[in-house]
Structures are given as structure tokens and as C-alpha cells.
Image: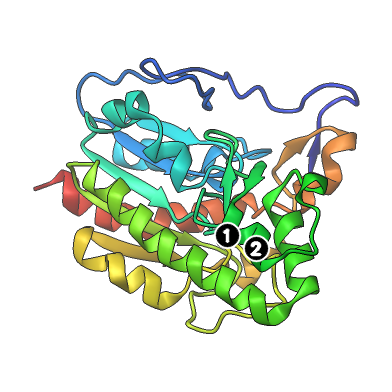
Amino acid sequence: MSYDQPGRGGLDYFPCRYGRSKTLFRGPKRRTEGAFIAYLGGAETYGRFISHPYPAILEERLGVPAVNLGWANAGVDAFLGDPDLLQVVGQARAAVIRLPGAQNMSNRFYSVHPRRNDRFLQASTLLQTVYREVDFTEFHFTRHLLTALRECSSDRFVMLREELQAAWVARMGQLLDRIPLPVLLLWFADAAPSDVTLAEDLDADPLFVTAGMIEALRPRVNGVVTVVPSDAARAEGTRGMVFSALEAPAAAEQLSSAAHGEVATALAPALKDILER
């Protein structure tokens, strides 16, 4: 593993903006004139602590500029609610969307921050009615909220989970409608997609997203690429990552540099096929 000096921030991510979007993305900034590939997603796409996340690796392998549009805790709303960003995406040759979880988006039960989608803002009247005994002023993040609601009532929690899943499929469909170019969906997680959703596993990522939900989107995209890190990639741990001593615990929770290499290997053939059309 690689440590920067204590007190420094580790990697320089060269934060930049694209178009008129207010969100800071990982740089160095790439030109959006001519052919480029847009990579949308959360922390895995951004590549925190990773010197060469999979968009950068694919840029080198394909010879096509990679515009990294990933940032931590981004849900569907972060992209769908940013028309300036979608205008930039619409100029790309292709787009790769790392599938987000279903918890970080506004729905019939609660609303989230429009850009920092993991921030819980407000419970709806419906949620307050279903969970009359809960004081919602105590929550600031979606996973904390969901954990408390599940502990309060597992039966009522099923209704909430199903709402999030239905809203996710609808919202992802809306996002795909706004991207008029070839799109690949990327599943990049510790386990393969399944139709079994364990109510007790709120640490799963992408949370609540099932194989059936992904299949519902398949007719609208150019392909779905599934990457579950190999045992060898898992064994790499934080080797090759760049972080300060204070950041070591957070780095240990990230998917490894080797896993990013496996994502690039899995995506390259499908992207090459799109580029050659």
C-alpha cells in the first residue's frame, strides 16, 4: 500500500467542472469536443484513493478520452436533476453508468439532497403516517434512516423497500431516455446481482437493486456488464492505493486497484464494439 505524508490529502484529484454543472468531478479535465466516453457513477467511478480508476485505464486502452463523471454517493437524482451535466453527456460517443443503489433518491416516502443524494432531507406525510412513532429530525443520512426504520418494523420496511425499487426502475428509465447515445450499464460490486434481497443487509451495494430490476432496463441499453472482483483482486486490499495514514480505514473499504483493472478488461470489448460502429 502507498501512504502519503500524514496530514496531506493523498492523491491530487484535480477537481474540475464540466459545462455549467455545479458539481466538482475528478480531473484532469478532458475536452468534450470530439469523441469521448462519459463514465457516470459514484465513488467507485470517481476512484477515491485509486491513481488509475477504470475510466483512466480505459482511456489508455481505447485511445479515447474518458470524462469521469463519478462522485461519492451519487444516486439517479444527481444525474437526472442536472440538465447541464446531461447536456455534456449527450455529446459523448458512449456512456457507461455504474448502477447506483436505490436508497439515495427522492421517492414517495422521503426526499434527498439534489446533489448529495445520501443526505436525507425530509420525510413525506406518507412516511410519517406509516411510522408515527419515529422522530425524523434525528436523521441526516439515508442509510441511518433505513436502518432505524427496519429495526422499528421489518413488516412495514418491506413496503418502503418495494417503493424504492419501483422508483429506481422508473427513474433509471427516465435517465436513459435523456441520454440519446449508446449506453452500457455496469454492475461493479462484491457479489453478483440476485433476485434475493436480504432486508438485514443494508451495507449491500448497490442497495436493493436486483437482477430483475436490471433486466427491466436491458432492452433500453446496449449491454449490461457485470464485474465481481476476483479472489486475487480482493487479496490486493489497499496495495497500490494512495492515501494518508488518517485515510487508511476509509481506503480499506474501497474496491481494490486490481478490481478496477478487471472492470476495464470487462468493459473494453463492448466499448470497442460501439466505437467501431
Name the element at disc 2: helix
Q: Position of residue 45 (x, y in %)?
A: 51, 43
In the drawing, does residue 213 fall left or right of residue 132? left
Q: Position of residue 236 (x, y in %)?
A: 71, 58
Name the element at disc 1: helix
Q: Looking at numbered disc 1 in the image, what kind of residue is underneath it?
A: Leu
In the drawing, does residue 55 fall left or right of residue 215? right
Q: Residue at x 56, y 63 (%)?
A: 189
Q: Position of residue 192 (x, y in %)?
A: 51, 75
Confirm whether residue 57 shows in the render.
no
Q: Nearer the viewer, residue 17 or 55?
A: 17
Confirm whether residue 15 shows in the render.
yes
**Badge 1 vs badge 2, beta-carbon distance below 8 Å:** yes
Q: Residue at x 66, y 22 (%)?
A: 12
For residue 19, above or below residue 216: above
In the drawing, does residue 145 fall left or right of residue 101? right
For residue 173, above or below residue 165: above
Q: Mark 1 packing: few (<14 Cα in 10 Å), some, or many (20+)?
A: few
Q: Looking at numbered disc 2 in the image, what kind of residue is underneath it?
A: Thr
Q: Residue at x 41, y 38 (%)?
A: 79
| Residue 129 image label | 2
Q: Mark 2 packing: few (<14 Cα in 10 Å), some, or many (20+)?
A: few
| Residue 126 image label | 1
Quadrant placement of the N terminus: top right
Q: Residue at x 83, y 21 (%)?
A: 8
Q: Nearer the viewer, residue 102 or 226?
A: 102
Q: Position of residue 108 (x, y in %)?
A: 50, 56
Real-space CA distance between mark 1 and mark 2, rounded to the nearest whole angstrom: 5 Å
For residue 250, above or below residue 242: below
Q: Nearer the viewer, residue 130 or 209?
A: 130
Q: Quadrant of residue 258?
A: bottom right
